[in-house]
Image (spheres, grey):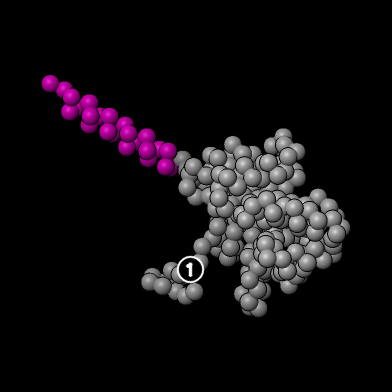
């Protein structure tokens, strides 16, 4: 990777994921042509009113044809590994979400040795946790920005520090900015160097909207109606 014409960095792409288990939201977002993947968790599954993790995950995979993360519910390494073995066999697009705990690190290390060991390490709240999951072999390190901000901390600083650490030591683990609360978080995550940003559908809708765009479009249409009307006069 390197700087190309006009200072643009070649080979760098910030992926945009949707943080939801609502298939209708995924379908709508995918139709926009900007969606790269989806992250889910047990809370999102509950909100979507589904208990069939496999069926919902595969339905989402069928829509996005990209990375879809499904979370384990076990808290011990043995249980996480057993769940991961099943989840990762559902599809080549599925990633298993493992929490950053002592047991989680044990599971990440084991799963990372598998040919299909696609791991989204979740519930990360410090650069040291991100460093540990990267060392253990995680594919993604999900940093919960919004939850830290809710507690009066600077969640985006953790993203920046993690980016610097991964770059300094050459970790292939990707930085994923999660728990996004509003569009400003997305801008900050992009500037902080996040590889992936996962957003709720409501935030994605806000990202594309601006009152200036709406007003400008209405003005253009109003002017066009005047021109078209004048052209039809005898």
Stretch of the chain drawn in magenta: 212-234
Asked whether residue 229 is drawn in magenta, I would say yes
Which residue appears at 81% of the width and 56% of the height? 82
Asked whether residue 10 is drawn in magenta, I would say no
- What secondary structure do most residues of the magenta stretch adopt? helix
Which residue appears at 55% of the width and 40% of the height? 27
Q: Quadrant of the C terminus?
A: top left
Measured along the vertical axis of the image, is residue 134 above or below residue 220? below
Query: x%, y% of residue 124?
Result: 74, 60
Secondary structure under the numbered disc 1 in the rendered image: loop
| Along the viewing direction, whichever of 17 and 199 lies nearer the viewer | 17
| Along the viewing direction, whichever of 208 and 214 lies nearer the viewer | 208
Query: x%, y% of residue 221?
Result: 32, 34
Determine if residue 127 is in view: no
Measured along the vertical axis of the image, is residue 30 above or below residue 5? above
Q: Quadrant of residue 110?
A: bottom right
| Along the viewing direction, whichever of 16 and 219 lies nearer the viewer | 16
| Along the viewing direction, whichever of 160 and 79 lies nearer the viewer | 79
The residue that label 1 is drawn on is: 11
Asked whether, in this view, residue 147 is left or right of residue 13, the answer is right
Query: x%, y% of residue 145?
Result: 68, 56
Instruction: Point out the residue furthest to the top here.
Output: 234
Asked whether, in this view, residue 90 is left or right of residue 190, the answer is right
């Amino acid at each position: 990777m390197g700087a190309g014409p006009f200072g643009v960095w070649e080979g760098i792409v910030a992926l945009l994921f949707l943080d939801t288990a609502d298939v209708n939201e995924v379908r709508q977002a995918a139709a926009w042509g900007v969606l790269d993947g989806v992250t889910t968790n047990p809370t999102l599954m509950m909100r979507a009113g589904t208990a069939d993790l496999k069926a919902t995950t595969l339905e989402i995979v069928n829509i996005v044809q990209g990375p879809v993360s499904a979370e384990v519910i076990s808290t011990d390494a043995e249980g996480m590994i057993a769940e991961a073995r099943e989840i990762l066999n559902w599809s080549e697009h599925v990633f298993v979400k493992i929490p950053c705990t002592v047991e989680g690190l044990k599971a990440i290390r084991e799963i990372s040795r598998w040919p299909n060991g696609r791991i989204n390490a979740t519930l990360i709240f410090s650069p040291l946790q991100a460093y540990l999951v990267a060392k253990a072999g995680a594919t993604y390190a999900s940093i919960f920005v919004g939850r830290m901000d809710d507690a009066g901390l600077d969640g985006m600083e953790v993203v920046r520090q993690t980016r610097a650490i991964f770059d300094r030591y050459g970790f292939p683990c990707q930085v994923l900015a999660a728990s996004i609360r509003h569009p400003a978080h997305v801008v900050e995550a992009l500037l902080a160097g996040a590889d992936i940003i996962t957003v709720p559908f409501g935030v994605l809708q806000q990202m594309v909207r601006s009152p200036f765009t709406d007003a400008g479009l209405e003005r253009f249409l109003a002017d066009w109606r005047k021109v078209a009307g004048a052209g039809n006069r005898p």
